[in-house]
Amino acid sequence: MRDERLQPLFRPVSVLSGVGPKVEAALSKLVLPGGAPPPATLIDLLLHLPIAVVDRSQRVPLRDAQPGTIATMDVQVADVRGLDSARYGRPVRITAEDETGDIEIVYFNARADWLAPTYSVGNTITISGKVELWNGNRQMVHPDYAVTQDKAHTIPVFERIYPMTAGVSPKLLRKAIAASLPSVPDLPEWIDKSYPALHDLPPFAEALQAVHVGDDQTGLGGTARRRLAYDEILSGQLALALIRHFSITGKGVARQTAGARADRLITALPFALTGAQVRAYGEIRADLASKDRMVRLLQGDVGAGKTLVALLAMADVAESGAQSALMAPTEVLARQHFETLSTFGEAAGLSITILTGREKGQTRNRILEGLANGSIDVVVGTHALIQDPVTFNDLGLAVIDEQHRFGVSQRLKLADKGKAVDLLAMTATPIPRTLIMAWYGDLDVSKLDEKPAGRKPIETRAVPMERLDDVVARLKSALESGLKGYWICPLVEESDEIDLTAAVERHKALQDAMGPVLAGRVGLIHGRMKAEEKDAAMAAFKAGDTRLLVATTVVEVGVDVRDATIMVIEQAERFGLSQLHQLRGRIGRGAEQSTCLMIYKSPLGATAKARLEALRETNDGFVLAERDLELRGAGEVLGTRQSGFKDFNVADPALDKDLIALAHDDARLMVSQDPHLRSDRGAALRLVLQLFRRDSAIRLMASG
């Protein structure tokens, strides 16, 4: 299916001189986008962009070479010491000079036969590398380049610095990229230059040339990089727009109901819906009534009431005669949802059950039978819902909670349990608008940006680790007065084992600090516990049998314990901004004043300091999400990168917000006008889909 003009670019890197099987494997690991199978191809190599440029164009006298900078100088070899003993592992020291001063050049474990031709006393040579100070004298250890005058032209003027990996030298990578550039063909233009922001972008082939071997630094942050970033973003947005068109448009079931069940539920609520909940429910009702399938993302800050909005949709689906399923990433979260839905769903006459790996034997068989014969309206569960034995009489609505924890295939697998299933994805992680478009371009978005009435803003303070004893003493006093809270242990590293050890040790230390009366009121929950043990720990905390819950971050501490008002986060500087906000959201869910204490280790880095200050300034998760994107970039905002087309090799959502918005609108407009990409521009756009490995969207067109 690939266009023949692109075939030269999709040859494996092993066609290049000097690239054998080991180097090919290393290059594949370095340059392939996430999920792409090896081997790497020439286009993968060319889309691996430099992150910096070293300017070796200017020659400077020795007196002007600043320590800590890279400098290029013409010098004369004045003295060579240690060349004869280099084979014994001793350093070789060369003194070189010009009319303004001198510098010592040092090599460790060097081969004398390589150095001798260049470093002959009296030779005038050109050296380039990092200048340092050693005992007050200038020094250059292992220069990047050291050549005699007749070879000075071989030193690159503007040298690209690339992200590297073991098994590939910078010289080999630069040589391989330069050898790949002639394979780039002249291609028809696929971007719409009528947009002012795209006027000055060079053609695709020119942009690649400028970024990799241009004669100045503008390729890195200028129009060449922006051109390639836009191409990558456009390919993703176009693929998502095609998925939306061929999977959704005209392929739904119009579920038009009077809304009687939902009305009964709303009437029975002990509180009023927020304006945002009313608006989001209205958008979902309109989707359900449409002949197009619903594919909507419901994003709301912690405690904004997403589950209740989903339940209202489930009531409408049940009234239409169909069933609903809610899939959550963890059993703890699934049971929380089951409890919430059961509490409020009774008023709507909904039959609700839960299915996880724990339901076995006759209980499981009864649930499976109820789903198959339609007597169960709503099922809540984990990955167990997408297993083969689970069949539905008529699945009408699939709700995916914490959408980013599931891959696209998992979310579609649940939807495949029925015909024309409407899909509602939910996330409690506020996502910046830029990333919503970049990652979920195939989803419409409803936003819950209001908290239920009566909730007070959480007081947030940052406390240095030196005051840990004061925090523990205040905590003890609070627990003695009947308050409840969480203690989140530090994220040591990506290791359940090490995080678990830290939590167990902190739990023991807090038990000792609380004294004999309160020691038994300190609970512990972590990822290695059995499901029944987790349930028992959470139930004890909810009932007040324990008043302090020590937890690791690998556990979804998602249970809605309304009277918990204290959150202590140990070594808060280790966490991302969104994660800190999520943890803080476990408190402040009732009418009482709540307090979050972020304990940090001094001294704080600039980014960590900015993070903690942002949390102290606002409780608004959407404001914090935008700040998080600025501070950390897109890759870590959600803590995982497996959904949709998240991976960017070239683009940076923090820098390219305008390009993402532009590509999002352009792709949707293009697909609405030419969904099979048969026009001249459509044919060119097929090329960009192939270049950035979005071929699956072309196959979707063929089958659609």
Image: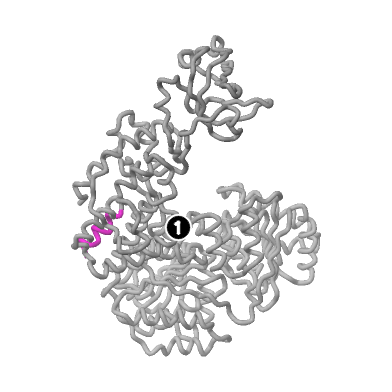
* Res 20 visible: yes
- 495 displayed left or right of 468: left
Magenta region's main secondary structure? helix
Between 530 and 246, which is closer to the camera in this rendering? Answer: 246
Decide: is 318 above or below 479. Answer: below
Mark 1 crowdedness (10 Å alpha carbons): few <14, some 14-19, many ≥20 = many
- 693 displayed left or right of 334: left
- 543 displayed left or right of 620: right
Residue 491 percent location from the top left of the image: 61, 52
Residue 382 percent location from the top left of the image: 46, 64
Question: Residue at left 57%, top 54%?
Answer: 528
The span picked out in magenta is 694-704
Question: Residue at left 42%, top 76%?
Answer: 378
Report the residue that reaches farthest toward the top: 84
- Quarter assignment of residue 416: bottom left
Between 168 and 377, which is closer to the camera in this rendering? Answer: 168
Q: What kind of element bears circle 1?
A: loop
Across the whole image, how many numbered discs are drawn on residues?
A: 1
Inspect the magenta stretch and tell me whether residue 405 lies in it. no
Question: Residue at left 80%, top 64%?
Answer: 517
Q: Which image quadrant: the C terminus?
A: bottom left
Residue 119 percent location from the top left of the image: 50, 15
Between 196 and 394, which is closer to the camera in this rendering? Answer: 196
* Res 359 visible: no
Inspect the magenta stretch and tell me whether residue 702 lies in it. yes
- Which residue bears the numbered disc 1? 653
Question: Residue at left 32%, top 51%?
Answer: 202
**What colour-coding does the image apply?**
one colour
Residue 353 percent location from the top left of the image: 46, 74
Decide: is 119 above or below 169. Answer: above
**Callout 1, which amino acid?**
Pro
